[in-house]
Image: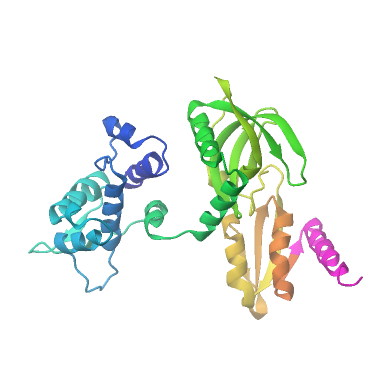
């Protein structure tokens, strides 16, 4: 229930699935209504984060000391110890169901329970938006705005509300090889950041498959008047890209790949393939063997080529041959 309640905050508030005003009206959903202000969500997530004190920490809190810290980024008069106590009771304890330790005299020592990894991920997704500068995301958005200087925000908003209204969009789209596809009618699902691009994931009813479109290449958007009547569910992002390292989507055409890599690049290689849920074995002489299922093996080759003799594609032969061809083609430019 804790994770479910927090997900409602994330997807209903932070990711704008409904407006803040709409949240205030929907009491029946049993999710926190942080006084209709995004700042209040930020405040009680600050408190929640500070109360996750590590074991053995000598740091203790009370409502006054927490209010003092929170006031550093806002008007001091806006936050008092009574506000902090209210956030803890109403939002952290009552709404999210997370208990807080207290000692005699009112010191708030820490959370009384550990947060499971899924819960922490949901919190971090929202909290990082307040405390971390995401330079990669900024770069991607700047690139998108530069490509659409007079309609970038309109494009985001119009597609977003088309998804809520279940309307198809009609657009032109320029492919990787420069081909212009005209009058495509698509069902938009959501925007995602992936591989240094902003993508719009759409469902193509004619092709009966999901496609990732580079957002900056979408042109001449028209939202269709009629709502679509296709019986399909918007897929979970992790499921959609379960066998992909890139933005490529084709879970129906996968191969099982085995690679070997040395201790020297172990951390790097396992970071690359971790989303593919590999099966990893330790071999002799500090080498490792990993087996996993992947759909975009050419992208894998491009990633592994950086690590030279420290990694080898063992099987299947077509993936191994793809790597050999890639290496020969790269070398040929220097042998002319």
Residue most toward the bottom?
285
Which quarter of the picture shows residue 265? bottom right
Residue 266 lies left or right of residue 326; in this view the side is left
x 40%, y 57%: residue = 128
x 55%, y 37%: residue = 155
x 70%, y 59%: residue = 300
Residue 286 lies left or right of residue 327; in this view the side is left
Viewer-side residue, 303 vs 219: 219
x 55%, y 52%: residue = 142
Whether residue 262 is visible here, answered yes or no, is: yes
Viewer-side residue, 20 vs 4: 20
Q: Quadrant of the N terminus?
A: top left
**Colour scheme of the picture:** rainbow
Q: Position of residue 177 (x, y in %)?
A: 77, 46
Magenta stretch, main secondary structure class: helix
Q: How many marks?
A: 0
User: Is residue 70 magenta-colored?
Assistant: no
Whether residue 227 is visible here, answered yes or no, is: no
- The range drawn in magenta is 314-336
Which quarter of the picture shows residue 304? bottom right
Residue most toward the left?
105
Residue 123 to residue 169: above or below: below
Residue 218 to residue 283: above or below: above
Q: Quadrant of the C terminus?
A: bottom right
Q: Position of residue 78 (x, y in %)?
A: 19, 52
Q: Position of residue 3 (x, y in %)?
A: 35, 47
């Amino acid at each position: 229930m804790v994770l479910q309640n927090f997900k409602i905050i994330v997807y209903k508030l932070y990711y704008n699935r409904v407006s803040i005003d709409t949240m205030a009206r929907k009491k029946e959903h049993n999710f926190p209504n942080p006084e209709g202000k995004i700042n209040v969500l930020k405040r009680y997530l600050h408190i929640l984060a500070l109360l996750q004190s590590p074991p053995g920490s000598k740091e203790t809190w009370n409502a006054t000391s927490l209010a003092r810290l929170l006031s550093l980024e806002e008007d001091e008069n806006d936050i008092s110890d009574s506000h902090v106590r209210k956030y803890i009771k109403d939002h952290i304890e009552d709404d999210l169901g997370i208990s807080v330790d207290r000692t005699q005299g009112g010191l708030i020592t820490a959370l009384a329970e550990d947060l499971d990894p899924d819960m922490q991920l949901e919190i971090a997704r929202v909290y990082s938006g307040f405390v971390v500068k995401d330079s990669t995301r900024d770069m991607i958005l700047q690139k998108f705005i530069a490509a659409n200087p007079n309609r970038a925000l309109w494009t985001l908003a119009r597609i977003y509300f088309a998804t809520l209204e279940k309307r198809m969009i009609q657009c032109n789209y320029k492919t990787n090889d420069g081909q212009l596809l005209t009058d495509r009618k698509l069902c938009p699902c959501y925007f995602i950041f992936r591989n240094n691009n902003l993508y719009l994931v759409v469902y193509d009813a004619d092709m009966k498959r999901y496609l990732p479109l580079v957002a900056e290449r979408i042109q001449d958007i028209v939202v269709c008047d009629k709502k679509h009547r296709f019986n399909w569910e918007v897929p979970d992002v992790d499921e959609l890209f379960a066998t992909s390292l890139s933005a490529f989507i084709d879970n129906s055409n996968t191969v099982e790949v085995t690679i070997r890599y040395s201790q020297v690049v172990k951390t790097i290689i396992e970071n690359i393939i971790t989303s593919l849920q590999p099966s990893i074995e330790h071999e002799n002489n500090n080498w490792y063997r990993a087996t996993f299922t992947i759909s975009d093996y050419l992208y894998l080759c491009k990633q592994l080529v950086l690590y030279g003799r420290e990694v080898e594609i063992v099987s299947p032969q077509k993936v191994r041959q793809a790597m050999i061809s890639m290496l020969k083609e790269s070398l040929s430019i220097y042998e002319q």
